[in-house]
Amino acid sequence: MADEKKLVEAITSMDVDFAQWYTDVVKKAELMGYSSVKGCMIFKPAGYAIWENIQKELDRRFKETGVENVYMPMFIPESLLEVEKDHVEGFAPEVAWVTYGGLNPLQERLCVRPTSETLFCDFYKDEIQSYRDLPKVYNQWCSVVRWEKETRPFLRSREFLWQEGHTAHATAEQAEERTQQMLNLYADFCEQVLAIPVIKGRKTDKEKFAGAEATYTIEALMHDGKALQSGTSHNFGDGFAKAFGIQYTDKDNKLKYVHQTSWGMTTRLIGAIIMVHGDDSGLVLPPAIAPTQVDIIPIMQKKAGVLDKAFEVKEALKAAGLRVKVDDSDKNPGWKFSEQEMRGIPVRVEMGPRDIEAGKAIIVRRDTREKTEVAIEDLATEIKAILDRMQVEMLERARAHREAHTNVATNYEEFKEVVATKPGFVKAMWCGDQACEDKIKEDTTATSRCMPFEQEHLSDVCVCCGKPAKKMVYWGKAY
Amino acid sequence: MADEKKLVEAITSMDVDFAQWYTDVVKKAELMGYSSVKGCMIFKPAGYAIWENIQKELDRRFKETGVENVYMPMFIPESLLEVEKDHVEGFAPEVAWVTYGGLNPLQERLCVRPTSETLFCDFYKDEIQSYRDLPKVYNQWCSVVRWEKETRPFLRSREFLWQEGHTAHATAEQAEERTQQMLNLYADFCEQVLAIPVIKGRKTDKEKFAGAEATYTIEALMHDGKALQSGTSHNFGDGFAKAFGIQYTDKDNKLKYVHQTSWGMTTRLIGAIIMVHGDDSGLVLPPAIAPTQVDIIPIMQKKAGVLDKAFEVKEALKAAGLRVKVDDSDKNPGWKFSEQEMRGIPVRVEMGPRDIEAGKAIIVRRDTREKTEVAIEDLATEIKAILDRMQVEMLERARAHREAHTNVATNYEEFKEVVATKPGFVKAMWCGDQACEDKIKEDTTATSRCMPFEQEHLSDVCVCCGKPAKKMVYWGKAY
């Protein structure tokens, strides 16, 4: 069978070659495909369905905080991109340029948006006149393009999907509040829905967004000990407002500049899910985000009554609010089991003629392989309980993994030793000088991931230069 | 107040200048804004929220028929666009070309997708091997770009949002079945959800999609008597499959070409909603698609208890499944009424201190202005009944308008007279020769909208050339 060929060779073990394991999972779980367009990927149904669930859940949370969705053009005229100087320096080298419309050269070339601050600013400039027009709390779901050289499925590609929120506020305090609010929303989403624990903190100036006053980030640790920036929230202060002239008349009748923020999450979250939860049998999806939560696999399905019962159970589980399918393909059950495991479906239900006769079925949990025999009438209740436990335990396990892979270094020899030998985060003090970040990166390839909100005092001096320390920083090699 | 200024000048009456009325409604209902990017529009929250509801409802209906969502790259290499000859001829003159990636010229230029048949074909070529891999029933929600010269909000712009379904089937019959199924789905959606009646039919060869064997369409009539193509479904036969080499091994072990379809609906549907249902007070939204269905407008809201009651009612209506908001801004009630009317919110609830004391409120229906006094505890039930009636009656009214604006012509003098003097559809017989379509277009600017599935025999001869007639055609001026 053609289908069987695809899976029959086992995937590379993650301990043997993590990068190859990742590529194997992406391919065999049919999450993504390669396209003829260099550096651009194809989201296959199983991959896109995860993104749809991420969208649904994030969008609901956004709207609860007053976010409204809009849609801006995908093109940015070169002159508009150039208005804010730091911003254009950061993005111009990596954008795609449209120079022809139909058969005619354009008078001004347009870049395909790498991010939309400039478009939102240009819009807000006309849209905002009075304090009554504030705040503006807009978001869009779209794709963006950055002309990357190296690409990897979900983690880095020339086009990716994301949401970008762009807000304008009357005061600096309100902008800061929104920046933090969205960072917290992102962190809660990662932990509660994706079961991925994150470190919240602030980026150093070297690592912050082009044009931002402050960039906050959530950093997650993958199974191989590398860090993944999983969401960022930027406070622009009034920098963009001054560059674009976005002013409003306040209650005191004075003309003031607005204060702005932006924040985004991308399809790289799917890469995070794979690399935090996956195992050597494939993907493991947190129940809260799994497009299919329950895979019913009939045993000896040609026997009278087996498939009928399987579909009857499916309807009952569906009615109970579960996302469920029956695998009634003509593959053998063992094959179906490994396919369900590869695809990371949280729970499978096995039921054959004898089980059905006895009014029972077997539930197998994807992450722990724990098997439970359950009366058919109790399936919905039991599965829900298992999914709830699984969701919580996946987060706990990921947190324990992160704790076990977070080390401390108080001098530079130790720091280099830890980075070289112990994959994971390194906590170490920093003087605040970019030269030390540069040196650390050059010596170890580790970068500053963030200055965590939860600071600790590990020593008085910078781990690199020995001058007085200002901040504790999480360091690590990153995707 | 800045807000009041925006609405204070009344909009142009639709009978005076329909095009200006349309532009006024788009602007004053805050559906769309102009951008600095020539020919590209900004979807503002009120406009985008309608699109979100269209997406939600269409997507649900798609998935019930087995559609799976995917996402393809937004770029198409020039060589890929050129594989199918009719297709490239149709689209190459109107695409945007990317020629630079970052600082470097590209080896091969890429167009921004105007539609994605070529990408799906390129993908299916590798993805489909066996009859077991069929059918593929994929769809994507995205934006596409066509370098139009003239643009109008929602109706024609260089970038627009849409969904594009692309399917591959084992047999010609299955492809035809899917083509028809999607056309019927579109028609049902337009009628049941958007309250827009449509004519289902087939496009002539002159009007069909570049590369299609057959294009089916649904055609709606706007208030001004012009037609709007509202959705299309194409059967490609095996033309693309042969051009791209998409073959599968069938059960009989023979290598066969797949049969393909594609089908799409776009944000121009929002233009249709405006032009079918709107009136001189602004937008009128069908309840099924309205982002806000009920606008509660408190009277004398500073009086103790009024706002509390308004929010209490809001919660009760929300719990009953209605989409509802309270307008507690500091504008006066009359102002709020005209704003609610401009935005097309189907029902408003007026409640002041005396109403509240008497346990009553006033409901005003947007389309008919019908007022009903209702006991507060009956509000949810009564509003639901009103919304249901409104949904049905809006469709009936639009259908009656279309019937009243559909004429018959049996000779060319009559045809020209009808097109010149009676805005609307003209039904007339046609010989099947493109020369007659060309002549009619040149003489009258009317085009063949479709050969309806429900054929009538109006005469034996073509309305244009007098030769034997093959089909009855709906003709009309179109957006």
Image: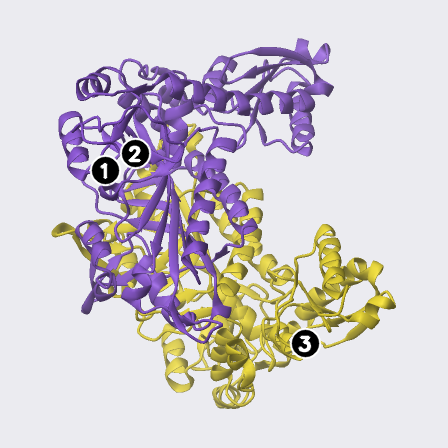
Chain colours: A purple, B yellow
- Residue A432, numbered circle: 1
Secondary structure category for the residue under label 3: helix
Is B413 on the left-hand or right-hand side of B150? right
How far apart are labels 1 and 3 at the CA level? 57 Å
The front one of A428 and A94 is A428
Residue A74's place in the image compared with A220, above or below, is below
Please, which chain is the residue tagged with disc 3 on? B
First-in-chain label (1 vs 2): 1
Nearer mark to the viewer, of 2 and 3 = 2
Q: Amino acid at mark 1?
A: Gly
Secondary structure category for the residue under label 2: strand
Tell me which residue sits at (42%, 32%) in the image: B133
Marks 2 and 3 in Cβ contact (< 8 Å): no
Q: How many marks?
A: 3
Residue A267's place in the image compared with A330, above or below, is below
The quarter of the rendered structure image containing the N terminus of chain A is top left
Tell me which residue sits at (29%, 41%) in the image: B245
Name the quadrant containing residue B326. bottom right
How far apart are labels 2 and 3 at the CA level? 55 Å
Q: Which residue is mark 3?
A: B333
In the rendering, at what x and y percent does residue A369 appear? 51, 12
Is A197 on the left-hand or right-hand side of B356? left
Q: Amino acid at mark 3?
A: Pro
Residue B22's place in the image compared with B173, above or below, is below
Q: Which residue is mark 2?
A: A471
Nearer mark to the viewer, of 1 and 3 = 1
Marks 1 and 2 in Cβ contact (< 8 Å): yes
The front one of A359 and A464 is A464
Please, which chain is the residue tagged with disc 2 on? A
In the rendering, at what x and y percent does residue A460 appear? 26, 27
Marks 1 and 3 in Cβ contact (< 8 Å): no
In the rendering, at what x and y percent does residue B235 appear? 43, 53
